[in-house]
Amino acid sequence: MLRFFRKWLYRRLHETYEKFLEIEKRKQFESAKLRGLVKVGGYTYGTPSIISFPGDKNEVTIGSYCSIADGVTIFVGGNHRVDWITTFPIRLMFELVKEPDEGVVASKGDVIIGSDVWIGNGATILSGVEIGSGAVIGARAVVSKSVPPYAIVVGNPGRVVKKRFSESQIERLLEISWWDWPPEMIAANAGILCSGDIERFCGLYSNQG
């Protein structure tokens, strides 16, 4: 009986802690949006962890209709100088600078994520990366370089393993940019959007994008 109670108590404590972490992550994400650090398009869901450090001035922009799984982390900065004798931020820690970013390259730039991007569980995206619309980032991938539209990226370091469609099809899809349509138009076209009939879709809308 005692063993059962211990298991039950451990499970409840774990669930409570997980809920606490999720609440804190959502608060941090909403705070980042309020501070202008993060901009998110319509209908995008998921709550990535946005990691920023003193002196980071870059932003994260996420397009519309993106699917972001649990455990996704986006680094706005935090890079250390590997070309210096030490990677430790001595000047910052010893308060030898007036501004946190003085003399330190803390970020490689903004993170820009297009629309209709699917980011898998536990993926990490580093600063300065641009992910094209329609791309897929595999679970636990570490993305340190920009990703072309409609590419599938896996692994650490992240690498493109294939494109979802042909180059001509991708060009037409980007021309159409269905994610910019009014919601009612998207809803009306849900049948074809949720199908593999890309040629018919492009034939219908490639001159109306």
Image: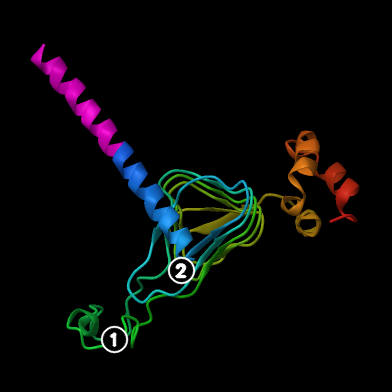
The residue positioned 37% from the left and 66% from the top of the image is: 52
- Mark 1 nearby-residue class (10 Å; few <14, some 14–19, many ≥20): few
* Residue 185 image position (x, y, % from top left): 80, 43
Marks 2 and 1, how far apart at CA = 20 Å
The residue positioned 18% from the left and 22% from the top of the image is: 7
Q: Which mark is residue 84?
A: 1
Q: Quadrant of the C terminus?
A: bottom right
Question: In this rendering, which labeled residue sits more in front, label 2 or label 1?
Answer: 2
* Residue 195 image position (x, y, % from top left): 75, 36
* Residue 126 image position (x, y, % from top left): 44, 65
* Magenta: main secondary structure: helix
Q: Which residue occupies the foreground of this view, 39 or 192? A: 39
- Mark 2 nearby-residue class (10 Å; few <14, some 14–19, many ≥20): many
Q: Which residue is mark 2?
A: 127
Give the answer, above or below, for where 26 lies relative to 77.
above
Q: Which residue occupies the foreground of this view, 76 or 198? A: 76
Q: Please tell me whether residue 7 belongs to the stretch shown in magenta.
A: yes
Three-letter code, disc 2? Ser
Is label 2 in contact with label 1 (beta carbons under 8 Å)? Answer: no
